[in-house]
């Protein structure tokens, strides 16, 4: 029996009661890959299995673009090009508005979990080191100006002195009289 969508009770904002509109929903799919690679040459079975994963996810998730994680690729190719797994369970995040499906293994291997933890730690350390560098730069600049008590004119002269030294170092060995005068100014 079909229920007409217009007859269902509505909430204040016009949505059907009991339904929640999410930006992305998450589903579990168990895909049978065997039917995709049974009639394929032995040396091409794993490649065909990967194509079958993309094809089935696009169909079941109703998405135009399917993005597979590197862990799926490693899991399927782990047994070689001739012997892919017959079934695979995936956790898929579906974005209906953009028509994108992002897939990840439902159960990550211990190695994959370690890799993810290492990545998170490395990112955290990078952020900390960047913050420390910024703090050091901020602290060093005010202290230098406060200790030396240089006037704004003296501060401006220092970069000019560096640029002159750089130009002299980059200048050719034999200079004309006009070039020497322009450098010394």
Image: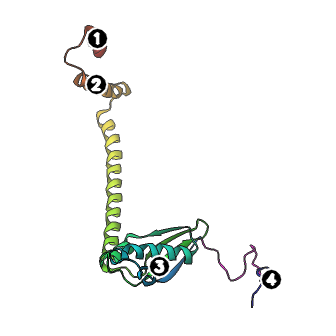
What residue is pinned by disc 2? 161
Quarter-wise, where is residue 119 in the image? bottom left
In reply to whether residue 44 is colored magenta, the answer given is no
User: Disc 2 versus disc 4: distance between alpha carbons?
Assistant: 81 Å
What residue is pinned by disc 4? 7
Q: How far across and down, in percent of the image, does residue 111 sit?
A: 30, 76
What residue is pinned by disc 1? 181
User: Disc 3 versus disc 1: distance between alpha carbons?
Assistant: 72 Å
N-terminal-most mark, 3 or 1: 3
N-terminal-most mark, 3 or 2: 3
Q: Nearer the viewer, residue 86 or 183?
A: 86
User: Disc 4 versus disc 1: distance between alpha carbons?
Assistant: 90 Å
Looking at this rendering, what residue extends furthest in the bottom direction? 1
- In the structure shown, which secondary structural element does the residue marked by tag 3 occupy? strand
User: Disc 3 versus disc 4: distance between alpha carbons?
Assistant: 34 Å
Q: How far across and down, in percent of the image, does residue 35 sit?
A: 45, 83
Looking at this rendering, what residue extends furthest in the right direction? 7
- In the structure shown, which secondary structural element does the residue marked by tag 4 occupy? helix
Magenta part of the chain: 9-22
User: Disc 1 versus disc 2: distance between alpha carbons?
Assistant: 16 Å
Which label sits in the foreground, 2 or 4? 4
N-terminal-most mark, 2 or 4: 4
What residue is pinned by disc 3? 91
Q: Quadrant of the C terminus?
A: top left
N-terminal-most mark, 4 or 1: 4
Quarter-wise, where is residue 156 in the image? top left
């Amino acid at each position: 029996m079909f229920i007409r969508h217009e007859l269902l009770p509505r909430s204040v904002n016009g949505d059907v009661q009991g339904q929640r509109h999410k930006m992305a929903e998450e589903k579990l799919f168990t895909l049978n890959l065997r039917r995709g690679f049974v009639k394929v040459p032995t040396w091409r079975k794993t490649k065909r299995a990967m194509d079958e994963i993309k094809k089935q996810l696009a169909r079941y998730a109703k998405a135009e673009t399917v993005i597979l994680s590197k862990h799926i690729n490693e899991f399927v190719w782990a047994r070689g090009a001739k012997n892919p797994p017959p079934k695979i369970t995936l956790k898929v995040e579906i974005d209906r508005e953009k028509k994108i499906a992002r897939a990840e293994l439902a159960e990550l291997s211990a190695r994959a979990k370690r890799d993810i933890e290492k990545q998170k730690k490395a990112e955290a350390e990078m952020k900390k080191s960047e913050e420390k560098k910024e703090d050091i730069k901020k602290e060093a600049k005010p202290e230098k100006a406060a200790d030396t008590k240089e006037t704004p004119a003296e501060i401006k002269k220092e970069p000019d002195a560096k640029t002159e030294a750089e130009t002299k170092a980059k200048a050719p060995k034999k200079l004309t009289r006009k070039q020497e005068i322009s450098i010394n100014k």
